[in-house]
Image (cartoon, rainbow, N blue to C red):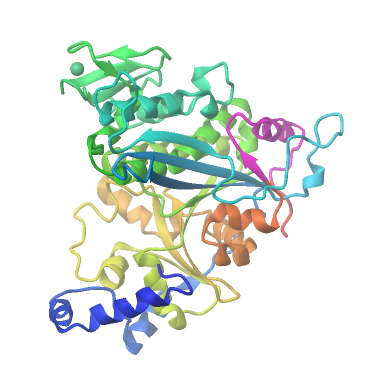
């Protein structure tokens, strides 16, 4: 996306596009183009009024998650020696007054602070070897990367209880792996690697223990996080931006489940007051894409438990600030009335957004998406692309799943999601980074799994019977 003031590159862009060779090439291509007047009007007619939220109140808390990554040369003299730095920040927004947050004896809670957040603020940071960097004792970047990623997921910074490895993000990965449809057994204490990264033997079982484990065939180390298969994309002598990006996106999607797991174990009630914002569509791509189905199932199980005790479901909203769907919405904006929303069906997507692309046989995003995209024009005329989690346990039977996820009435939380987006509307609109946007004008607390904030959240809900604040 171009930024204001990027005039220099714009000139170059015009030169390239007006070049006759490029014009001739483009004549044989299909790509996103503005709709005709007639087409625009029929698209605008597909939008429906925003449904009235069944539960008209907003969640008491919002957690917003966002990742960033850097790959940098260690020294200008060795530009091809690189280290990667992935960071995922989370902020907790208290929708009630900050001042109401007190510990049991009435003191203000410490270490709260109104976060002055930017991308350098504290978050979950992970250093990974990239090109030409090896950990001592390891023979390749790939093996170093595997060890560093596993250390990080298991490490104390990701734990809710520093002394318990079962409270780590890696254990959350075990919980997710036990919910994959092809799991050999549904046991969160063990998981199966599809193959050993060293000898390639299939189906290697590893346990959720802190000790280093070894392949029974070749005796080389195997790590539980090998199940993410990110190592398959790690190269020794070139930039590993792709793998770093995979790690970042995975963490962005695993972190909400990590918080949910902790709160479900410590205080289910607090979950009925919570909503998550994540960056981008609710989807996981690449070798770890299998995790999207496990996340969907995990959310379904938790929300089933919440419903059983009369609480509202946990809501995950993916907010998209860039990409084809966002570009498309900008093109049709003038045809859409205010206070209208539209579910992006596959038919719509392949007709207007991915024009010329062959529809996927299983339905769009079958291997990657755990949420459905929506287009929104708010009552004040701002446009948003967002997604809400698919409220289903599994994607089978396929035809039924595809029909249900394209039926707006499956998304009972749609009205509440729109209401929440409208609540934060101006901040979200101006700032591309959601946690920063929310922190600007709201009481925000920088979150780490080990922080006392979540404990407070859990404890607070015990003494508070109303899950939601009143309508604002
Ligand atoms: Zn092996």
Rendered position, 160 above or below 413: above
Q: Residue at x 71, y 50 (%)?
A: 443
Q: Residue at x 53, y 54 (%)?
A: 413
**Residue 66 percent across, percent down from the top left:** 50, 48
Q: Which image quadrant: the N terminus?
A: bottom left
* Quarter of the displayed picture in which ligand 1 can be seen: top left
Name, please, the residue furthest toward the right: 106
Q: Residue at x 54, y 68 (%)?
A: 50
Magenta span includes 451: yes
Q: Which image quadrant: the C terminus?
A: bottom right
Rendered position, 213 above or below 10: above
Compared across the picture, whether 213 is left or right of 322 comes to left
Q: Quadrant of residue 14?
A: bottom left
Q: Quadrant of residue 10?
A: bottom left
Rendered position, 230 above or below 424: above
Name, please, the residue furthest toward the bottom: 37
Compared across the picture, whether 158 is left or right of 371 comes to right
**Residue 359 percent across, percent down from the top left:** 21, 61
Q: Residue at x 66, y 57 (%)?
A: 440
**Residue 142 percent across, percent down from the top left:** 26, 30
Res 406 seen here: yes
Q: Magenta part of the protein: which range?
A: 445-467
Q: Nearer the viewer, residue 392 or 440?
A: 440
Res 45 seen here: no
């Amino acid at each position: 996306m171009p930024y204001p003031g990027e005039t220099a590159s714009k000139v170059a862009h015009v030169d390239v596009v007006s070049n006759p060779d490029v014009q001739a090439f483009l004549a044989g291509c299909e790509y996103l183009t503005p709709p005709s007047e007639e087409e625009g009007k029929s698209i605008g007619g597909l939008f429906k009024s925003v449904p009235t939220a069944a539960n008209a109140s907003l969640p008491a808390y919002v957690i917003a998650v966002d990742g960033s990554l850097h790959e940098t040369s260690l020294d200008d003299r060795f530009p091809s020696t690189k280290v990667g730095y992935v960071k995922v920040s989370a902020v907790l927004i208290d929708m009630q007054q900050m001042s109401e947050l007190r510990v049991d004896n009435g003191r203000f809670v410490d270490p709260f602070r109104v976060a002055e957040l930017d991308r350098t603020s504290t978050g979950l940071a992970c250093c990974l070897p990239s090109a030409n960097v090896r950990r001592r004792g390891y023979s390749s970047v790939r093996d170093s990367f595997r060890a560093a990623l596993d250390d990080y997921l298991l490490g104390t910074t990701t734990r809710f209880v520093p002394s318990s490895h079962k409270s780590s993000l890696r254990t959350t990965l075990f919980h997710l792996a036990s919910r994959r449809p092809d799991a050999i057994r549904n046991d969160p204490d063990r998981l199966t690697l599809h193959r050993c990264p060293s000898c390639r033997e299939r189906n290697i079982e590893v346990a959720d223990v802190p000790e280093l484990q070894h392949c029974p065939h070749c005796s080389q180390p195997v790590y539980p996080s090998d199940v993410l298969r990110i190592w398959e994309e790690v190269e020794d002598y070139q930039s590993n931006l792709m793998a770093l990006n995979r790690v970042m996106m995975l963490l962005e999607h695993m972190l909400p489940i990590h918080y949910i797991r902790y709160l479900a174990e410590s205080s289910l009630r607090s979950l009925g007051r919570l909503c998550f914002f994540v960056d981008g569509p609710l989807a996981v791509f690449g070798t770890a894409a299998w995790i999207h189905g496990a996340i969907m199932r995990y959310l379904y199980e938790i929300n089933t438990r919440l419903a059983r005790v009369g609480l509202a479901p946990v809501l995950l909203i993916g907010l998209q600030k860039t990409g084809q769907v966002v570009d498309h919405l900008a093109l049709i904006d003038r045809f859409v009335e205010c206070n209208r929303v539209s579910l992006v069906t596959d038919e719509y997507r392949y007709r207007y957004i991915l024009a010329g692309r062959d529809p996927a046989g299983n339905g769009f995003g079958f291997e990657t998406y755990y949420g459905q995209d929506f287009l929104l024009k708010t009552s004040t005329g701002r446009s948003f692309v967002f997604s809400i989690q698919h409220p289903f346990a599994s994607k089978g039977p396929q035809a039924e799943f595809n029909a249900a996820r394209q039926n707006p009435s499956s998304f009972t939380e749609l009205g509440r999601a729109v209401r929440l987006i409208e609540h934060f509307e101006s901040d979200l609109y101006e700032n591309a980074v959601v946690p920063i946007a929310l922190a600007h004008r709201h009481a925000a607390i920088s979150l780490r799994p080990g922080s006392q904030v979540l404990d407070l959240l859990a404890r607070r809900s015990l003494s508070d019977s109303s899950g939601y604040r009143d309508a604002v």
